[in-house]
Image: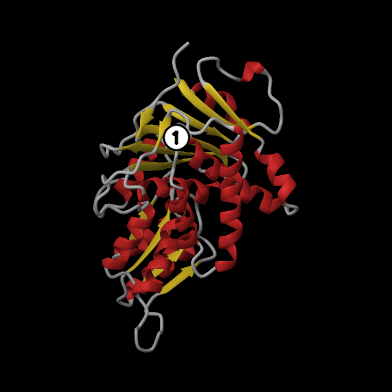
Amino acid sequence: MPQPIERVNDFVVKFANVNGSGSASANQLFAKSILRMGVPVSPRNIFPSNIQGLPTWYEVRICAAGYLGARGGVDLMVAMNPQTWDKDVAGIEPGGYLFYDSTKPMPDSKFRKDITVIGMPLTEICNREYSDPRQRQLFKNIIYVGALSALLDIDIAVVEKLIGDQFKGKDKLIAPNVKALHMGRDYALAHLACPIGLRVKRAEAVGKRIFLEGNNAAALGCVYGGATVAAWYPITPSSSVAEAFARHCSRYRVDPETRKNRFAIIQAEDELASIGMVIGAAWNGARAFTATSGPGISLMQEFIGLAYFAEIVDRHADAHAAGRRAGLRLCQPRRHQARAALPGRPA
């Protein structure tokens, strides 16, 4: 039997969740808290292009040396999705840890003997504390972040400060989230062996780096590149480009004297309409762009052809979900899209 893994500021945590469960913001809160403690993190969202109810994962590499690439293997699996349980448990390194919702008993055959199993009745706690089904789901995510703060020795004050930052302007949401955070932490301290072999220790290894997702960075680049118009139609995983652009514009594209917006963001009725709006705005002299994914680019081809022949510059943020379902198998079509976007190049 391998000994439990013992590492400080050098391990991988992976969250297995259900798409649409509200887990994304909680998982990001977890990653940001480690960065705020001065330890470099490299998180990545892993999901196929799917709708609410299907699997999604969020992997966080904690690495004091600052390495950003996927290391391979998982030291701590936060298994919140019964659909992917077997695969998630199989991906844990020998000597690693499994954190799961133990409300519903599971047979011994569902566990491995070479890992440390940590069960916490998350659903039971939420059912006892909350009557609204949506609140039960959303606060369940914050409760497990609180439990992880105890298990990994994360400074709870850092997480509290991040919750305050996240809900700035929506102050009534701060106290309930902080309460849920402490519910999870208090339960873990009272009933679980805290901390485990994996620990986060304050460091000074981050420097001036900030936590920024790729789509958010692309949106900020559009702002600094002079874009004032965005027309888009929601599609995973590109929607957050337009959403981030809206946030940045509300900060950097508002006239300081008149308080009038100096930007236009339009959610169109479909992909074809969105690229049509972008071309029209560009034809009128604005720097305009759209954000979409693979199927969206396909639906825009008629107007893309018009822009090519009319020599109108239009910009596309084309985001793709990677992985076996939407990645390797579709890499050739994605190259096709890249070639289609280059003027004068055969597709």
Residue 164 versus residue 117 in the image, above or below: below
* In-image side of 240 versus 130 (left or right): left
Q: Can residue 51 be seen? A: no
Q: Nearer the viewer, residue 213 or 172?
A: 172
For image coordinates 36% across by 47% down, the residue present is 37
Q: Nearer the viewer, residue 258 or 179?
A: 179
Residue 299 versus residue 44 in the image, above or below: below
Q: Nearer the viewer, residue 289 or 58?
A: 58
Residue 80 versus residue 272 in the image, above or below: above
Q: Can residue 112 be seen? A: yes
Please provide percent x and percent y for residue 120. 63, 34
Residue marked by disc 1 = 13
**Colour scheme used in the picture?**
secondary structure
* In-image side of 10 versus 129 (left or right): left
Residue 157 versus residue 84 in the image, above or below: below
For image coordinates 68% across by 49% down, the residue present is 136
Q: Secondary structure at mark 1?
A: strand
Please provide percent x and percent y for residue 205. 26, 44
Quadrant of residue 107 within the rendered picture: top right
Q: How many residues crowd mark 1 within 10 Å: few (<14), some (14–19), many (20+)?
A: many
